[in-house]
Image (tube, rainbow, N blue to C red):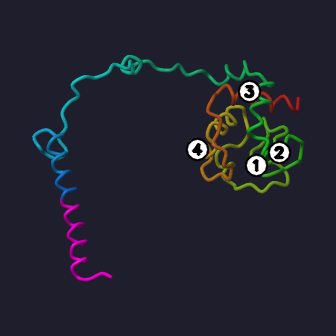
Amino acid sequence: MFDTMTFTKTLGALCGSLLIFLLAGWAAESLYSIGGGHGEHAEQAYVIDTGEAEGAGEEVAEVAFADVLAAADPEKGAKVFGKCKACHKLEDGANSTGPFLYGVVGREVESAAGFGYSGKLKAAADVWTPENLNHFLENPKGFAPGTAMSFAGLKKIEDRADVIAYLDSLDN
């Protein structure tokens, strides 16, 4: 079926196609670059103003967490806690994938009875104060590197304050 001449023609066609492809790439590079050099680029002739340069100098005012916590809404915190329900229970002593969170505000770190902790939290804090909970809920892996908690965190400070207020309201 295949003889030497057919094989030679096929190989020649492939090599010719490759040569044309390489020459077309070289021509396009020469046409669209300055002076035909590699890696040289001209400045943009027209720059679209998006307004980013104006806002670059403005800084976002940092709000004290105590102020946000004072204005926190436990009812909103109950809704945000829905993200935590998969791993945590609110009943006293009812551990799940994570430890129970009843009375967690003001409780010693790694003190939920019957839960096997990784030991990384105790190195980060001694007591679950609202400030420690705020930092932990913002970025668990950043607060306690090596912790087994795989939750990404709550990015909004208001959400964190609402959840902490909700958890604090559970045990009166």
Count numbered badges in the picture: 4
Q: Is residue 144 above or below residue 104?
A: below
> At x 74% / y 27%, what residue is drawn?
162
Q: Amino acid at mark 4?
A: Gly
The CA distance from mark 2 to mark 3 is 18 Å
> At x 81% / y 24%, what residue is drawn?
75
- Residue 4 in magenta stretch: yes
Q: Is residue 48 left or right of residue 126?
A: left
Q: Amino acid at mark 2?
A: Phe
The residue where tag 1 is placed is 110
Precedes in sequence: disc 4 or disc 3: 4
Precedes in sequence: disc 1 or disc 4: 1
The residue where tag 3 is placed is 162
The CA distance from mark 4 to mark 3 is 21 Å
Secondary structure, mark 3, is helix
The residue where tag 4 is placed is 142
Residue range (magenta) = 1-19
Q: Which mark is residue 100?
A: 2
Secondary structure, mark 4, is helix
Precedes in sequence: disc 2 or disc 3: 2
Secondary structure, mark 2, is loop
> In front: mark 4 or mark 3?
3
The quarter of the image holding the N terminus is bottom left
> At x 61% / y 33%, what residue is drawn?
155
Q: Position of residue 33 (x, y in %)?
A: 17, 40
The reply to whether discs 3 and 1 touch (Cβ–Cβ < 8 Å) is no
